[in-house]
Amino acid sequence: VTTPPLRNDLFDETDEVLWEAKGEVGRFAIRLAVGQLLDYKRFEPGPISLGILVPRRPSDDLLAFIATVPAKAAWPDGSGGFVVHEG
């Protein structure tokens, strides 16, 4: 059985961060993003960071979960930029 190539949503070459974007901030979406990132990371040579891009700030509980991965979380700040939470 041939496995199709895995495609992550974004790779920041400057900071070496592998990002997975989700359209919601619920527990299921965050857990799915974590699983996807860990799967993708297996195929990346060298040390890289992980990040989850979401449309708004996750709950404190989910931010704590993301930090244990460890991964970053980022969401729009309302002025064209992003808030990056690094746990």
Image (spheres, grey):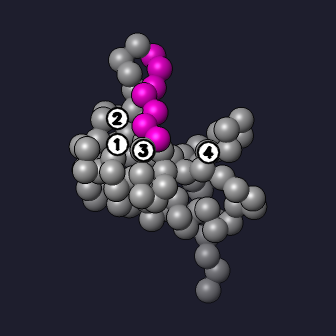
Spot occupied by residue 22 in the image (x, y as percentages of width and height):
39, 46
Residue 23: mark in rendering: 1
Q: Which residues are magenta?
A: 80-86
Name the residue carrying label 3. Answer: 87
Q: Are marks 2 and 3 in contact (CB under 8 Å)?
A: no
Query: Label 1's element?
Result: loop
Which is closer to the viewer, label 1 or label 3?
Answer: 3
Judging by the rendered image, the residue that carries numbered circle 2 is 55
Give the Cα distance between marks 4 and 1. Answer: 19 Å
Q: Which mark is residue 5?
A: none
* Dot 2 and dot 1 residues touching (CB under 8 Å): yes
Is residue 58 or residue 10 the one in the foreground?
58
Circles 1 and 3: CB distance less than 8 Å?
no
Q: Earlier in the sequence, mark 2 or mark 4?
A: 4
Quarter of the picture holding the N terminus: bottom right
The Cα–Cα distance between marks 1 and 3, rounded to whole angstroms, is 21 Å
Q: Residue at x 26, y 55 (%)?
A: 27
Q: CA distance from mark 3 to mark 4?
A: 15 Å
Relative to residue 35, is residue 43 drawn left or right?
A: right
Where is residue 4 drawn, in percent x and y?
A: 61, 70
Nearest-to-viewer mark from 4 and 1: 4
Real-space Cα separation, disc 2 to disc 1, in angstroms: 6 Å
Q: Which residue is mark 4?
A: 17
The kind of residue on which mark 2 rests is Pro
Q: Position of residue 34 (x, y in %)?
A: 44, 59
- The residue under the point 45% across, 16% down is 80
Which amino acid is tagged 1?
Gly
